[in-house]
Image (cartoon, coloured by chain):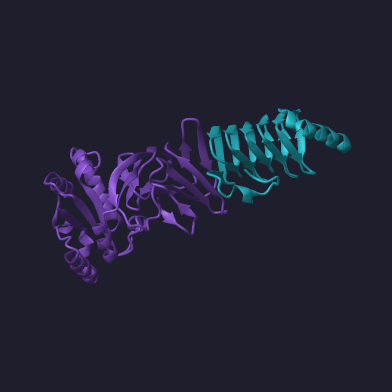
Chain colours: A purple, B cyan
């Protein structure tokens, strides 16, 4: 059974057309399932976990990056993760903006997403871990005043700029094409004087006394914090035009 | 691998790049190609190749298969295969190399030693260069 988790922002009238179009396409393809609207639910985690216990074959995030993160947060490191890993897949139907995760999986729009759900092309994906928070895309922090500490060495940016810690992202402008299968995070430091630093790291610690780390553009995390990558943590239905192999 | 010149283009596929505004402290050891444009203190080692940029400052012993230096290194250098010193290179330390090229303007304070038979010819050439410069 498919379970569609609609994010609460989809209640806005401007998304009606997209939602209708998606629902018609799902019906045409015979992919109907149970719909859960997060807008009316207080215990999101409990609701999603209950659906997995009831035997959901696919949990589909209908919304944006934050919707996907809410679902991952409800599944990973919980009692039902074992069941999820054995029986359940994660699907994504992007609606609206802030959908870089779906784009990385080769999912262009809601109609394309429906076709991809039908094809069921499956990839096991690494997740980044910042403290207690898992992330699919990236975490970022101001570079000046930040120290990146590893077992054998440390890095200290001496200019203002941005440190990006990337698990899965395709950014052709900045020449970033990360691989969520390699067990490594891409650390990219861009400073104001157009200096770029690129590293592939698996485990490190970040410290900045004044700035917080922003995880997938949503969650702010205080430092010092440990950062690592967890291999093949979640099975996702992906498109053939995904940004990685 | 890179051709026998001192240009960064050969390192476009480098897995690790340390930018000009970054300071690295400690033992920086890798397996792929490394580009250093910033500052590094400690030790620097890879099984592949290293490029040291013009404005880079490295206070470390350096080990690599091939090494291109355009900046400053204070420390001993051990290169299995090919070492290229650009015109802006400044080396304070002993050097072991397989093959060697030195561009006019490079400075070396230390002992140069060829580590295999193939490079004996290069070693002699270096001695000649030093003699001419003196």
* Residue A63 visible here: no
In this view, A152 is above or below A109: above
Quadrant of the drawing holding the C terminus of chain B: top right
Position of residue B122 measured from the top left corner of the image (x, y, whole percent): 78, 34
> Residue at image x 36%, y 50%?
A137
Please state if A180 lies on the left or on the right of B93 as rendered: left
Q: Is residue B64 left or right of residue A46?
A: right
Question: Which residue is at the front of the view, A39 or A169?
Answer: A169
Q: Is residue B58 above or below residue A113?
A: above
In which quadrant is the N terminus of chain B drawn? top right
Q: Visible in this render: residue A157?
A: yes
Q: How many marks?
A: 0
Residue A106 image point, x, y percent:
35, 58
Q: Position of residue A233 (x, y in %)?
A: 30, 42
The residue located at (70%, 47%) in the rendering is B5
What is the x, y in percent for residue A183? 40, 40
Residue B100 found in image quarter: top right
Q: Is residue B17 left or right of residue A60?
A: right
Q: Establish if B35 lies above or below A238.
A: above
Snapshot quadrant of residue A240 = bottom left
């Amino acid at each position: 059974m498919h379970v569609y988790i609609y994010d609460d922002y989809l209640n806005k009238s401007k998304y009606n057309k997209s939602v209708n179009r998606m629902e018609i396409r799902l019906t045409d393809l015979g992919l109907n399932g149970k719909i859960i609207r997060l807008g009316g639910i207080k215990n999101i985690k409990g609701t999603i976990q209950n659906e997995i216990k009831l035997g959901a074959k696919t949990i589909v995030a209908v919304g944006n990056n934050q919707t996907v993160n809410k679902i991952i947060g409800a599944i990973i490191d919980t009692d039902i993760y074992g069941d999820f890993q054995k029986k359940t897949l994660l699907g994504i139907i992007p609606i609206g903006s802030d959908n870089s995760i779906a784009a990385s999986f080769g999912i262009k729009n809601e109609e394309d997403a429906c076709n991809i759900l039908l094809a069921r092309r499956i990839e096991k994906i690494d997740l980044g871990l910042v403290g207690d928070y898992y992330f699919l895309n990236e975490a970022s922090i101001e570079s000046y005043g930040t120290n990146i500490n590893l077992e054998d060495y440390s890095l200290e940016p001496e200019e203002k700029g941005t440190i990006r810690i990337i698990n899965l992202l395709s950014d052709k402008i900045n020449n970033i094409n990360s691989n969520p299968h390699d067990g490594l995070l891409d650390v990219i430091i861009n400073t104001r004087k157009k200096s770029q630093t690129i590293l592939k790291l698996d485990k490190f610690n970040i410290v900045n006394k004044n700035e917080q780390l922003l995880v997938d553009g949503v969650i702010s995390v205080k430092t010092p914090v440990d950062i690592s990558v967890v291999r093949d943590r979640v099975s996702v239905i992906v498109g053939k035009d995904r940004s990685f192999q | 691998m890179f051709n026998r010149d001192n240009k960064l283009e050969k390192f476009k596929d480098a897995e690790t790049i340390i930018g000009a505004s970054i300071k690295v402290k400690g033992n920086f050891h890798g397996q792929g190609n490394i580009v250093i444009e910033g500052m590094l203190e400690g030790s620097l080692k890879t099984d592949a190749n290293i490029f040291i940029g013009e404005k880079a400052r490295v206070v470390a012993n350096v080990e690599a298969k091939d090494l291109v230096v355009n900046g400053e290194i204070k420390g001993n250098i051990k290169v299995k295969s090919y070492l290229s010193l650009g015109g802006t290179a400044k080396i304070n330390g002993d050097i072991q190399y397989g093959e060697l090229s030195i561009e006019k303007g490079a400075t070396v304070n230390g002992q140069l030693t060829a580590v295999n038979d193939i490079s004996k010819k290069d070693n002699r050439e270096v001695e000649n260069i030093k003699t001419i410069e003196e």
